[in-house]
Image (spheres, rainbow, N blue to C red):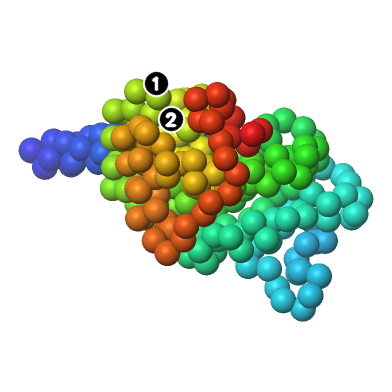
Amino acid sequence: MMKWKWLIAILSIGSIVLSFGIPSAEAEKIKSIRNQVEKHNFFRAAPSATRLPFSTQVKGSIDKNSMWRCRDGIEETLARLPTELSSRLKVLILNFEGGERGLADADTVILRCDVSKTERLRVFLHEMGHVAYLSSGVELQADYKKLWEKSGEADFVSGYAKENEFEDFAESFLAFVEFGESFRSTRSTVLSEKYFFIEKNFFPDRVYNGDRADFTLAFDMTKL
């Protein structure tokens, strides 16, 4: 009898994990991050005496100047975010070997370097959206998933946001910071709910204006 009770308890816990879990393809992508890292020492400290709040590593062989160019703008971009959010980033990996433009888990971002500065920094913000989301509790994630599930065709900031709730949140996070005025003025009720969800839970004291954007035409917010 006792064995059956333990079995039921284990199955119940498993069902809870699955109900709030990451889609398998996304989970595999995130798990692979730690296996892609080749440590490097160039960026253990900032140019000044101030030590960075995260470690920077490199994937691939590259010269020091190229790495500085890739990292250009990262600290300024992080400074636009509340400290509580920016401090969640523990490891930044600069990728010089191609592949996906960005990957993230709850405290690590891999950023591909062979794209323009504007696109690279927007990819970085998108990935910081993943960091923010994945480092939050399951209840908050479940609440946002409900917003994603009730979204119609016009209730996303981009075509890519329709992939799953994780990409929807990351794209909406990017839109909040880079295209705040357009995001706030949307006529979509669900998009407005997403805006205020992000504001309430991640940016309670921040308002961004930024560039204008037509969300009905955007597939990828990082390329606007």
Nearest the camera: 124 or 88? 124
Label 2 SS? loop
Image spot of residue 146 (x, y percent): 28, 35
Q: Residue furthest bottom?
A: 49
Is the residue 31 above or below the residue 161 in the image?
below
Label 1 SS? loop
- The residue lying at 41 percent from left, 33 percent from top is 165
Image spot of residue 29 (x, y percent): 56, 34
Is the residue 122 above or below the residue 189 in the image?
below
- The residue lying at 51 percent from left, 30 percent from top is 215
Quarter of the rendering occupied by the C terminus:
top right
Nearest the camera: 135 or 148? 148
Image spot of residue 106 (x, y percent): 50, 50
**Residue 214 figure quarter:** top right
Q: What residue is pinned by disc 2?
A: 156
Report the disc number at residue 153: 1
- The residue lying at 61 percent from left, 63 percent from top is 79
